[in-house]
Each structure stands twice: as C-alpha cells, then as structure tokens.
Image (cartoon, helix red, strand yellow):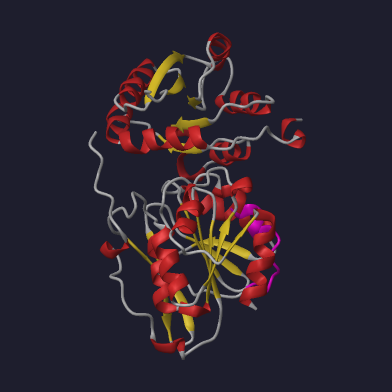
Amino acid sequence: MKAAKIKVLIVDDSAVVRQTLSEVLESDSQITVIGTAMDPLFAIKKIQEERPDVIISDVEMPRMDGLSFLKQIMSDQHPIPVVICSSKTETGSENALKALEYGAVDIIQKPKLGTKVFLEESKVRICDAVKAAYQARIRPLPAHVVTAAVQPKLTADVILPKPEPMSGNLETTEKVIVVGASTGGTEALREFLEVLPVDAPGIVIVQHMPEHFTAAFAKRLDGLCKISVKEAEDNDTVLRGRALIAPGNKHTLLKRAGARYFVEVKDGPLVCRHRPSVDVLFRSAARYAGKNAVAVIMTGMGDDGSRGMKELHDVGAYTIAQDESTCVVFGMPNEAIKAGAVDVVLPLQHIAREVLQKAY
C-alpha cells in the first residue's frame, strides 16, 4: 500500500514565493501541496476545507501577521505543525525568538533579494524541515502564552579524523558537558540550562540553527539562566558557570591544552547534513575529554550525534538521551540508543540533575 503524502499549506503574500515553494515541495515524492493562501485569513478558510499536516508561513503579511496566525494555530486543542519561512527572521530577530516561543517547529530564513533562487537551492533543507514538522509532537501553547539532488551525507571524518583518545587524560580531571539538539531543542535547552547552578561545569552545545540566529538565542538564554550563556568564538575557554553555543554555519570542536579546555570554531563541509554538527562536537570531546565528558543528546530529527556519542561512550564518558515522551522529535536520541551509545534515557526534566551528579 502506498504511503500517504505529507499535506502542506503555504501561506505567503508573495505569489513568486507561493509558486516556488510549491514546486520545491512537490518535487519530493513524500510531500504534496494541498493549497496556498496570500494571508492568514484565507489560510484559515482553507484549513476548514481540508486540514493540512504542516503549514509553511511567512511572518509579514496583510490583514494578520504570521506570528498572530502561529499563535492562533498553536492555541488550538489539536495544533498543526508550523514552519516559519521569512526574511524577517534575520540576525536572530525578535520575530524568530517569538516564533519559537509560540511553537514553530523550525525557521527557514529567506534573503530579502534572490528569494526564488534561494528557495530552489534550499530544496533539501526545506523538505527536511517539513518532514521534521510532520513527525513533531506538537502541544498546544500554555495558557500564559495564549493570554535538487541530495548532497552526500558526510561524517565527522571530514572535520576531525577519528583518533585514539588522549592517553589517560592525565592533565586534568575537570569535567565538561557536551550537548546536541535539533528540532525542538531551543525550548529543551532553555529548560535544561535554567535549572543549572552558577558553578555548573563548563558546557558546549550544538543546536542546529541558521547563521546569525545563535547569538540572539544565546543572549536570550543568558538573561534567563544563573549560568552565563554566549555564542562560541574561536579559542573561547570552557569555564565553570558558562555555556558556549556553537554559532550557526560553523563547526565547533572541544579542544584541550594542558588542563584548559577551549573551543575551536571552524568552517568545513556539512556533516550529517548539518553545520554545526553534533557528531563533530562529540568526536572532539571523545578525543580531548574522554571519560571526563558527560554527553547529552536531545530532541531532533535524523541521526546527527549518534556516532559521536558512541565514540564518547566507548572511551568511558557518561552519556544521556532525552526520552521519547518529552522529545518533539525522537529521531536523534533514538538513533543513539539504537547504536548502543547511551548509558541512561531520561525525561527532559530529570536530565540536569543527572548531569550534575555525574559531573561534580
């Protein structure tokens, strides 16, 4: 029996964007576009006629803005997954932060110029975002919020060849925490980091995000958490009481000089179709921290992080996966579990406590 296609509704006031997105999505055999709308009010009528599985929506539109539309969709008892595709999410804008807060599954940043070409070139990214949204576990907003050809899938070998771990990690016994997340990870990371004490061991995080967005994300978390949070810069020291978030479109590796942990931020090809890649961070942690690392893999689509976590597990690091019931998408943790890379599987609300017990 033929599998049903993912039904998508496109909401954008640009006819060119609606047409181009339709062509991009229809080129994927697993996706069908059931309709387009020039603004949210037309979209609401179309949803009443036929319910889509996923909505792709712009932010700036006539009659109702995209954030109000998103909030309305996510306030329903049975919300529909939404992917935001907008030029108004540039440089980690407030619009993008609000979209994630209101429950958007993913954000695709359109350029202000050359949008048609960008959408055509971003076929894999856009189709993957729709598929991730389709698999996402969507929950209604809490009451307080309401009031082209596939590129080769490269491994971490292209950034950091798999070496033997440093002998015995003799220079330091200082613990370090490494975390990987993707779809649904922005809120999962907030919940995790908010409860950490000011003297928590140093943390390095890869969250799949667009370029320029991670700085604003880090700044937002820095204002919410006891620990400091910043976008990683090359050669930043990994310190107690601080979390470093890999910048969008850059790989981030953990390194060590004597007893000092620091990060290397570098260019390179996509790994597991991502840059930054969790596998790259985890492999570097296996090499330079070994058994002194505590690794966490959180919600996300795909398998980025599973190989790196297995390498960490094999050198004696303690490894934790977020459980299915609290994941938006269980893909990444599930792949790590299937790889035999995970010591313990925990709901999100218990992960911080477990990390602290193992890292002190």
100 vs 299, nearest the viewer: 299
**In the image, residue 332 above or below residue 101:** below
Q: Is residue 316 magenta?
A: no
Tell me where residue 259 appears, x and y as whole percent.
48, 86
**In the image, residue 263 above or below residue 345:** below
Q: Quadrant of the C terminus?
A: bottom right
Tell me where residue 164 appears, x and y as whole percent.
33, 79
Q: Residue furthest bottom?
A: 170
**In the image, residue 328 above or below residue 191:** above
Can the viewer see residue 111 in this picture?
no
Tell me where residue 53 appears, x and y as whole percent.
50, 24
101 vs 2, nearest the viewer: 2
**In the image, residue 114 above or below residue 202:** above
Q: Residue furthest front?
A: 1
What residue appears at the point 58 percent right and 11 percent down from the top-left corner? 48
Question: Is residue 247 left or right of 343 when viewed as pictured?
Answer: left
Tell me where residue 223 sits by quadrant.
bottom right
Which stretch appears magenta? Answer: 189-200
Q: Quadrant of the N terminus?
A: top left
What residue appears at the point 52 percent right and 27 percent down from the top-left corner? 59
What residue appears at the point 38 percent right and 31 percent down from the top-left corner? 112
Question: Is residue 62 left or right of 233 when viewed as pictured?
Answer: right
